[in-house]
Image (tube, grey):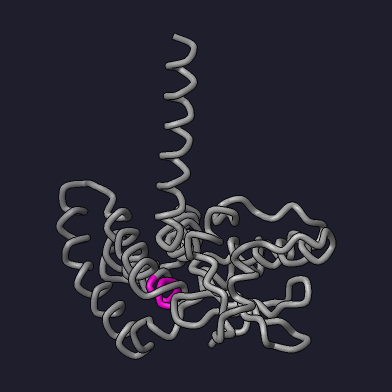
Amino acid sequence: MKSGFQYRGYQISKQGDRFLATDLDDQECILESRYVIRLMNGVDALWSALETGEMHTWFTNWMGSPTPTIDLDEPDAAEHLSYDRTPTTPEFTPVIRAAAFALEAAPSEVDPPNKISFLFCCSTVAAVIPVALLIEYFNIDPVIVFRMVVVFAAVVFGVVPAIVVTALSMFAYNFSAVPPVFDLTIPTSIELYYGLTNLVMSFVAPWLHQNADKFKRTIVRTLSGVSITGSSLA
């Protein structure tokens, strides 16, 4: 389990590909979801229920259940707790937002072992060098080839292996695409720019991959709303 951060009296952590919110006081109530944002919205909902005295159905159902975990992805909870709309409470600070993003991007226990990840990534970068040389022969910048390797590593293996691939790709690009070829030189400004963009992709790609389902549902909901509005105007 990867411990993350505290939010309104709950410890937010990651176990496998699931997120958990554990009550810091009695640890008898554990919220669970595939989405860290839904998890935090669930915490906010519990606090709101305490303030108003109106308990949610998914919570009252849990009180009569022997299990200590509340699955917020079940229909009775999911329809009330958004997975893509961030909390609006004062406790949801920029620091908490950054911590939630980092926890989402962090590799989990279900990811491949580090040794296998690094070996595969290093081998892939080495295998791409001949491809880069071939592309360079036709006067085409092979930077896109190395970027594809970085994105692949980020999506499949996570942030840390992707960062390693980013560093290796900078050396490989310098070695195979920057004159004099087959000789390492001081990185140029454009190489540093490529390295920086690849580093950004190392963090962004896993986050996008993990939230792909959420984005698809948001897009479908938005387009459906536009379609309905257009039909009513017609």
Please say if 2 is above or below 96: below
Visible residue check, residue 191 = no
Q: Residue 146: give x, y in percent of width and height.
A: 31, 62
The residue under the point 43% across, 32% down is 223
Visible residue check, residue 86 = yes
Q: Quadrant of the C terminus?
A: top left
Q: Residue 122: give x, y in percent of width and height.
A: 30, 79
* Furthest residue toward right: 51
- Looking at the rendering, which quadrant does residue 91 occupy? bottom right
Q: Residue 173: give x, y in percent of width and height.
A: 33, 64
Please say if 223 is above or below 63: above
* Furthest residue toward front: 64
Count of marks overlaid on the render: 0
The residue under the point 22% across, 67% down is 128
The residue under the point 42% across, 73% down is 158
Q: Taken as a whole, is the magenta stretch helix, strand or loop?
A: helix
Confirm whether the magenta stretch covers residue 158: no
Please say if 11 is above or below 207: below
Q: Which residues are magenta?
A: 161-165
Q: Nearer the viewer, residue 74 or 203?
A: 74
Horizontal arrangement in the rendering, residue 144 relative to residue 86 (left or right): left
The residue under the point 30% across, 59% down is 148
